Each structure stands twice: as C-alpha cells, then as structure tokens.
Image (cartoon, rainbow, N blue to C red):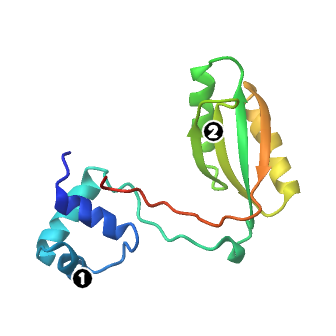
Amino acid sequence: MILDSFDLNILDIIQNDCRLPAEKLAEQVGLSASAVQRRLKKLRDAKVITQEIAVIDAQYTAHTISFFAGLEIERDNYTALRQFKSWADDKKNIQQIYYVTGSVDLMVLVTAPSALEYDAFIERLMVANPLIKRVTTNVILDAPKKSFYTPTQI
C-alpha cells in the first residue's frame, strides 16, 4: 500500500490519540470526516494499523516489575527461533520480542509481579525451549520514556 501525505498525517495524529473523533481528525488533516473514516478503514484493512490499544501504567497492575531478557539460541537455529515465537505467542507477560544482532539472539520484554515469579517463568521458558542455551536478565529500574510512536515522516 502506498501512503500519501494525508495517510501519514492521520497515522501521526492517531498514534497519540486513537480515540480522536473523525471530525477532529479531519480538521487537523484538511479532509472531510467521511474521507478520514474511509482512509482509516483502508489503513486498518491493509494492516498498516496493526492494533489500537490502551497503555496502562504498570503500578496499577499485578505485574509491576519489567525485565529485559536476553536469550541466546543454540547455534544459528531458525527452527528454535520459530518454536520460541510460537511458544511465546500466548504468554501475556511477554510484551515484546526483538530478534537482534550482538551477544544475544532475542531481547524479550517480560513483566512479572516479583523476581521470584520472573525466575519461575524463565525456568518454564527454558524447559519448553531446550535450544535456548542462556538467558541474561536486566531489571528495569525506571522508564523515563516509553513510547510506541513511530515517526511517519522524515
């Protein structure tokens, strides 16, 4: 799908407030509300917009601690990578997975109510994914900036 400047402006605005009414969005981008609605439908149908979510402050949840887990896979094993992704898909405490270069193969953002619960989770991860040879953990002490915003223009 080729995005024009109207699409990019719409995407830029809704990343900060996806509940903004079409009328207000239309005023900001210079289109009619119905044109904005059609464009939003097209962007959703084409999977340009993959998800619209509420971001919740973790202090109000049971999972108040976040961890970055660096996972090393035994050898260059794409089967193990696919198996881990499949295993992780339904784990709600895994927020994000990144396949990366460097000393680890995957960086995984995991939440837990305590360090003990995290440790038990990592044990289950290692049992279910025997080709993960090592996990290194960094506890997130503070997150001065958290964002899902993706710049739409240069």
25 is higher (above) or lower (below) than 135: below
Q: To which quarter of the image does residue 62 belong?
A: bottom right
Q: How crowded is mark 1: few (under 14 residues within 10 Å), some or many (20 or more)?
A: few
Q: Residue furthest front?
A: 154
Q: Which of 69 and 132 is in front in this view?
A: 69
24 displayed left or right of 58: left
Residue 101 — which label?
none
Please report the residue visible at 57 percent of the width from the left and 22 percent of the height from the top: 78
The amino acid type of the residue labelled 1 equals: Lys
Dot 1 lies on which element? Answer: helix
Where does the image place residue 65, in percent across and percent down from the top left? 76, 62
Q: To which quarter of the image does residue 152 belong?
A: bottom left
Q: To which quarter of the image does residue 88 belong?
A: top right
150 is higher (above) or lower (below) than 73: below
Residue 87 — which label?
2
Placement of the N terminus among the 4 image quadrants:
top left
Residue of label 1: 24
The amino acid type of the residue labelled 2 equals: Trp
122 is higher (above) or lower (below) than 105: below
Earlier in the chain: of badge 1 and badge 2, it is 1
Disc 1 + disc 2, Cβ < 8 Å: no
92 is higher (above) or lower (below) than 101: below
Please report the residue visible at 69 percent of the width from the left and 52 percent of the height from the top: 110
Dot 2 lies on which element? Answer: helix
Where does the image place residue 107, in percent across and percent down from the top left? 65, 41
Where does the image place residue 147, in percent across and percent down from the top left? 52, 63
Q: Nearer the viewer, residue 129 or 67?
A: 67
44 displayed left or right of 127: left
